[in-house]
Amino acid sequence: MNKRLIAFTILLVAALFAGMQVKKAGILHSAQDVFSKQTIRYGASGDDVYELQGRLKFLGYYNGNIDGSFGYQTLRGVKDFQYKFGMRVDGIVGAKTKLRLWEATKNWTPTTPRRTAGGAAGGGAAGGGGAAGGTAAGGTAAGGTAGGGRVTETAAGGATPLTPSNRRGMSDNDIRIMANAVYGEARGEPYEGQVAVAAVILNRVQSPSFPKTASGVIFQPGAFTAVADGQIWLTPNERAREAVQDALAGWDPSGGCIYYFNPDTATSKWIWTRPQVKKIGKHIFCN
């Protein structure tokens, strides 16, 4: 009797395991039916990008044209989707991101005709990591970029420097020091929080109440903890540089804020009087 029960249990477990594998294979196959096996990256173009943009737009993560071209708006949509779904935020659409996107958009049907053939071509972009950050008593910090401006890959595989239209008139030095500030202030924050810190700097540059350059904003006396404690001079990682580029491209997770602070470390009573907009990671963003 015991032998029969053991044998039956083994057969039942084997059947359940086989069923799960079949189901998993079916899901993977369904995702592969709508995307090619190629990894989709910034600078890519083709049918995979049409599919990607359509599904991101269906979920509300992309508001641009469905044109089959993987540009900055598509990159921001992918990163936002990855962040909201608890995935690694690197802007690269591999097998995991494709599967998660397909599962979230099973009811989506294409409404825009495709104008190109094939999968996705081209590449570029990756993410980084970091430690912890602080914030100034009454101010806040922000991001930057590498040496002489960001270089990304085009669909043809060539290197293209960041165009002036994406620099907002910023000098190489301003972009560099923004990256230093983002890294010094927010390297332990989620990627969205790092972009928000960079956006705060840009918002200050646009405000009549602050200096008109990124360097002027960052080095304004008492504005940023990273300047006060010397962390502004740490070498930023790629993630901090990308956060600056995303902010320069128009992504502002802060919602237009000009201040932020860490409630666990802030010593200024004044900063608590500012209208609070949202909290991202450890930072509260306010106006």
Image (tube, grey):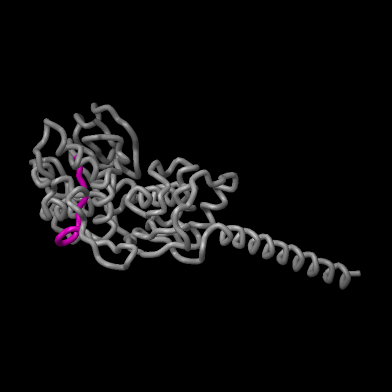
Percent coordinates x, y for residue 136 in the rendering: 18, 41
153 shown above or below 242: below
Residue 68 is inside the magenta segment: no
Q: Which residue appears at 19% of the width and 29% of the height?
A: 270
Q: Nearer the viewer, residue 176 or 50?
A: 50
Q: Nearer the viewer, residue 164 or 142?
A: 164
Q: Nearer the viewer, residue 204 or 12?
A: 204
* Residue 232 as seen in the image, left or right of residue 125: left
Instruction: Provide the major secondary structure of the magenta segment.
Output: loop
Quadrant of the image containing the C terminus: top left
Percent coordinates x, y for residue 202 in the rendering: 19, 41
Q: Which residue appears at 42% of the width and 49% of the height?
A: 83
Q: In the orientation shown, which residue stands out farthest toward the front?
A: 115
Q: Which residue appears at 18% of the width and 38% of the height?
A: 139
Residue 143 is inside the magenta segment: yes
Q: Nearer the viewer, residue 10 or 104?
A: 104
200 shown above or below 42: above
Percent coordinates x, y for residue 259 in the rendering: 22, 36
Give the residues in magenta.
140-149
Counting the numbered discs, the total is 0
Q: Which residue appears at 61% of the width and 62% of the height?
A: 29
Q: In the orientation shown, which residue stands out farthest toward the right?
A: 1
* Residue 258 as seen in the image, left or right of residue 101: left
